Amino acid sequence: MKFGVVVFPGSNCDRDVAYVTRDLLGQPTRMVWHQETDIADLDVVIIPGGFSYGDYLRCGAIARFSPVMQQVVEHAQKGKFVLGICNGFQVLTEAGLLPGVLTRNRDLHFICDRVLLKVERTNLWTQAYTTGEVITLPIAHGEGRFYADKATLAKIEDNGQVIFRYEGENPNGSLNNIAGISDRRGNVLGMMPHPERASDAMLGGSDGLRLFQGLLEKVGALA
């Protein structure tokens, strides 16, 4: 199984993700420069956190037009797996692979903290968790408030696309406490918290590692 980690100018969590997939999970991992146009060798594409293109215009708005993103869209349309973390989540919404948008935090402050998340579904890549389990992951964002119009939000809820919700205090004002969603097919997942920063117990927690392990198991079962 081969992972690809997309690198835009301004990405800063790409090596963190590669450390998890390559060093902790022992899987082949390739860093994918944003100008690449061939990712056919990859099973899973991960768009990491950071500040792609300096977050000019709007978070993820410029990255959406990178040559590699057309390939990522086609990758997803084939039913292959895509994970967007933080800025990667923003890029996926801009690219139309996920509904809604990520806007400025409620208090207009950048937030760097650890938060509690409730796992809503365990039949996607989250089978290593239990339904309703509360886990702890770090966040670090200034534009993490999930927003969608009423009709879109209702569809997201009705279709069971909410994967993670903030538990207890909502750090950024996201509607319905949404912290992570999937597409309708369940092969594209975007989330604001950083599972890669909670994958090594030496860093104070490993709740995030189970997401990657579940993804590895899911793709392996389909191979």
Image (tube, grey):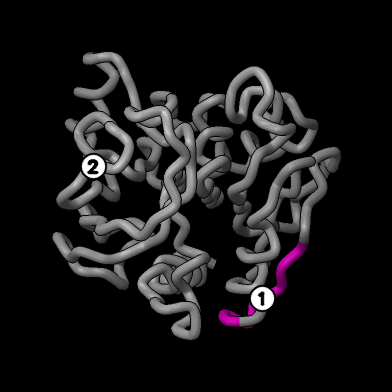
Instruction: Tell me which corner region of the image, top left, top right, bottom left or bottom right, holds residue 24.
Output: bottom right
Question: Which of these two is toward me, 70 or 49?
Answer: 49
The local secondary structure at tag 2 comes to loop
Q: Residue at x 41, y 59 (%)?
A: 138
| Residue 175 can be seen, yes or no | yes
- For disc 2, the neighbor class at 10 Å (few under 14, some 14 to 19, many from 20) is some
- Whichever of callouts 2 and 1 sits on the residue coming sooner in the sequence is 1
The local secondary structure at tag 1 comes to helix
Is 184 positioned to the left or the right of 159 in the image?
Answer: right
Is 219 placed above or below 46 here?
below
Q: Which residues are magenta?
A: 24-30
> What residue would you read off at disc 1?
22
| Location of residue 22 in the rendering, given as x and y in whole percent from the top left corner | 66, 76
- For disc 1, the neighbor class at 10 Å (few under 14, some 14 to 19, many from 20) is some
Is 188 positioned to the left or the right of 163 in the image?
Answer: right
| Location of residue 102 in the rendering, given as x and y in whole percent from the top left corner | 44, 28
> What residue would you read off at disc 2?
170
Is residue 27 covered in magenta?
yes
Q: Residue at x 53, y 46 (%)?
A: 84
Q: Which quadrant is home to the N terminus? A: bottom right
How far apart marks 2 and 1 lie (CA) works out to 33 Å
Is 156 positioned to the left or the right of 145 in the image?
Answer: left
